[in-house]
Image: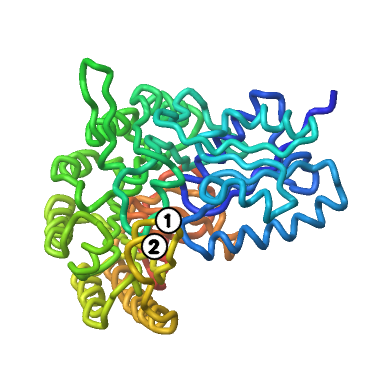
Amino acid sequence: MKIKKVFIETYGCQMNFSDSEIVASIMSKNGYQNITNVEEADVIFLNTCSIRDKAEQKIRKRLQALQSVKKKKPGVVIGLLGCMAERLKTQLLEEEQVLDIIAGPDAYRDLPRLLEEVESGHKAINIILSADETYADITPVRPGNKGVSAFISIMRGCTNYCAYCIVPYVRGKERSRDIDSIVHEATGLFKNGYREVTLLGQNVNSYKWSNYVETINFTRLLNRIAEIDPLLRVRFATSHPKDISNELLHTIAAYQNICRSIHLPVQSGSNKILKLMNRGYTREHYMERIEAIHRIIPDCTISTDIITGFCDETESDHQKTLSLMEWAAFDYAYMFKYSERPNTMAAVKYLDNIPVGIKERRLNEVIEIQQQLSFQSNKRDLHKTFEVLVEGASKRSSLQYAGRTSQNKVVVFPKQDHQPGNYINARISNFTSATLIGEVVE
């Protein structure tokens, strides 16, 4: 019997890449072979993102391109997984005739059965959201099973209901994964040569797992992972400003292998907009948390997310965002113009009343300021020496390697005899707004 080959194409956030590894594990255990060449595939899965309209349009274009694949190879099965599948459900089967399978983010265990249904001549769909699915018992299949850094999903779903966000509707209620399964996975990764793990959750600060004897919060989980081995770096994403605690900050400060880098999305510098967004904090609270980070972890970098042109955002609101950016001096930022997502609180309650041209102009102003801030951040690192985890060859030169500092900054340096997974010390000799350039020192 021929072993069927599966190709998984991933779009969107780190969580989706983690999910694709879970899908690969499920398929492997059910007799399928995971491959990296789409032309050889018997099954093609697109693991999708729905957080912005632009992401969905990209996937629509990919589905159009796959129509030619289907014509050349009529037996190939094409499935859409994840958030876009959950949001649009049966509508996708009607609009995208190339699709055979629709599976939401809690339906991955059901994929083998859905494939059997397709083989019997039917389209197949499962978009049921679960109140307890965490895939805790599944060991993800990572590409090549050999690497330096890996993602570990510690929780799924979200219950914050930010007005602009589709996540609670496509990933379900928040639930945390068994701590022992997380520690077991991280330990296994370290033994297999990985030297960095990133703990993933929509809001890692609200991680909470109970075995009816004790309740474990995120700080205690982080403590357990950090103690696996000093050579295992630990990162996490994403923190929510309303929940990040001093207890967590002191834990980061206490362990050298917990990375000095915190992603803390602010979205807006205006209290009016933050309230409309249902973010649960004020500008003043956010600034107090930034001050606490710098006080407790002086060498910590801070990155953020910013949305421009949210409903009812005035020029004054926008200027407050710019002023907060300059005050916080973010080291890096993910910046977007507001994109209304159907059925979110904002889509139901508010008018998307900021013209596209104004959204784009404000976004460009945010980008310009952040480029200056990133440049100044890297300039401050000039002539400093950092411990760098070697990740692999530089994208621009085979004679150079690239790695990251604890502060999550990319450093490019001469290749020499170093290997991925090694730690080296690099003295920064030059920089751009995106990259540090270093020389290896003893």
Q: Can the viewer see residue 76?
A: yes
Residue drawn where x is 65% and y is 44% of the image? 8
**Front position in the image: 119 or 190:** 119
**Residue 15, which numbered label?**
none
Query: Height in image: 410 above or below 327?
Result: above
Question: Residue at 22% of width from left, 53% of height from top?
Answer: 241
Check contact, mark 1 vs mark 2: CB within 8 A: yes
Residue 392 locus on image (x, y percent): 54, 51
The residue that disc 1 covers is 343
The vertical placement of 336 against 255, above or below, is below
- Up-down: is 319 above or below 255? below
Work out how far the residue at label 1 is from the one at label 2, CA to CA, in angstroms: 6 Å
The residue indicated by pointer 2 is 347
In the figure, is residue 352 to the left or right of 277? right
Q: Circle 1 sits in a helix, a strand or a loop, which is it?
A: loop
The x, y position of residue 328, in whole percent, is 21, 67
Under mark 1, the amino acid is Asn
Instruction: Identify the amino acid type marked 2.
Output: Ala
